[in-house]
Image (cartoon, rainbow, N blue to C red):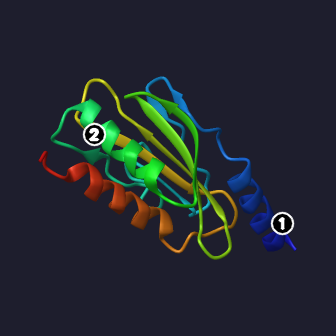
């Protein structure tokens, strides 16, 4: 009985996890469930930790690249976009239309993008969030042409 309650609470924490957005120059943390990755997760939290996405272009070009990718992709709803600084989107999986919340924050002081990707429903994402972050890494890692 205790195990069932524990799984129930972890699943609820996934849905009711820390709100999205930037707080004091950082993206909010991940819930304890393994359905979220964040570049601003605790330093040694191997479950949620991904590296920030480094880019060599200007901040404006990097933001435009990722924004254009989102605007041109299917199954994406852009819920908030602050030009050159922050973008929050909802991805919907192709088959079952499960929603995933993705945030990308471009701090002023570094040539890197902070990223957070979380499956809103479910306990585990089967590494979908890590694969998604790697796609963003490829988009932002391109050299200027």
Residue nearest the viewer, comparing 76 with 33: 76
In-front residue for pair 21/26 = 21
**Residue 43 percent across, percent down from the top left:** 37, 47
The residue singled out by tag 1 in the image is 5
Name the residue: 41% across, 54% down. 49
Q: Is residue 57 above or below residue 132?
A: above
The count of marks equals 2
Q: Which residue lies furthest to the right in this view?
A: 1
Mark closer to the chain start, 2 or 1: 1
The residue sitting at 47% across, 48% down in the picture is 71
How far across and down, in percent of the image, does residue 82 sit? 48, 28
Q: Is mark 2 on a helix, strand or loop?
A: helix
Name the residue rendered at 28%, 31% in the picture.
Answer: 60
Residue positioned 53% across, 74% down in the render: 126
- Left or right side of 119 for 25: left
Q: What secondary structure is marked by label 1?
A: helix
Residue 139 percent across, percent down from the top left? 28, 54
Q: Read off the residue under disc 2.
A: 62
Rendering coords of residue 121 (x, y %): 70, 62
Q: How crowded is mark 2: few (under 14 residues within 10 Å), some or many (20 or more)?
A: many
Q: Residue 29 carries which label?
A: none
Q: Which of marks 2 and 1 is in front?
A: 2
* The image quarter in which residue 63 lies: top left
Pick the quarter of the image with the N terminus. bottom right
- Left or right: residue 145 versus residue 32 is left
Q: Is residue 81 left or right of residue 92?
A: left
Residue nearest the observer in this picture, 133 or 139? 139
Q: Which residue lies furthest to the front in this view?
A: 72
Q: Distance between the residues labelled 2 and 1?
A: 44 Å
């Amino acid at each position: 009985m205790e195990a069932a309650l524990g799984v129930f609470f972890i699943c609820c924490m996934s849905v009711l996890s820390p709100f999205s957005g930037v707080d004091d120059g950082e993206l909010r943390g991940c819930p304890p469930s393994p359905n979220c990755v964040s570049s601003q997760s605790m330093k040694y939290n191997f479950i949620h930790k991904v590296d920030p996405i480094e880019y060599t272009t200007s901040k404006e070009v990097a933001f435009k690249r990722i924004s254009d990718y989102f605007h041109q992709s299917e199954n994406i709803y852009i819920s908030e976009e602050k030009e050159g600084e922050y973008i929050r989107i909802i991805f919907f999986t192709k088959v079952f239309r499960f929603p995933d919340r993705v945030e990308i924050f471009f701090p002023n002081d570094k040539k890197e993008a902070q990223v957070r990707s979380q499956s809103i429903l479910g306990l585990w994402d089967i590494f979908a969030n890590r694969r998604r972050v790697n796609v963003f890494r490829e988009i932002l890692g391109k050299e200027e042409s």
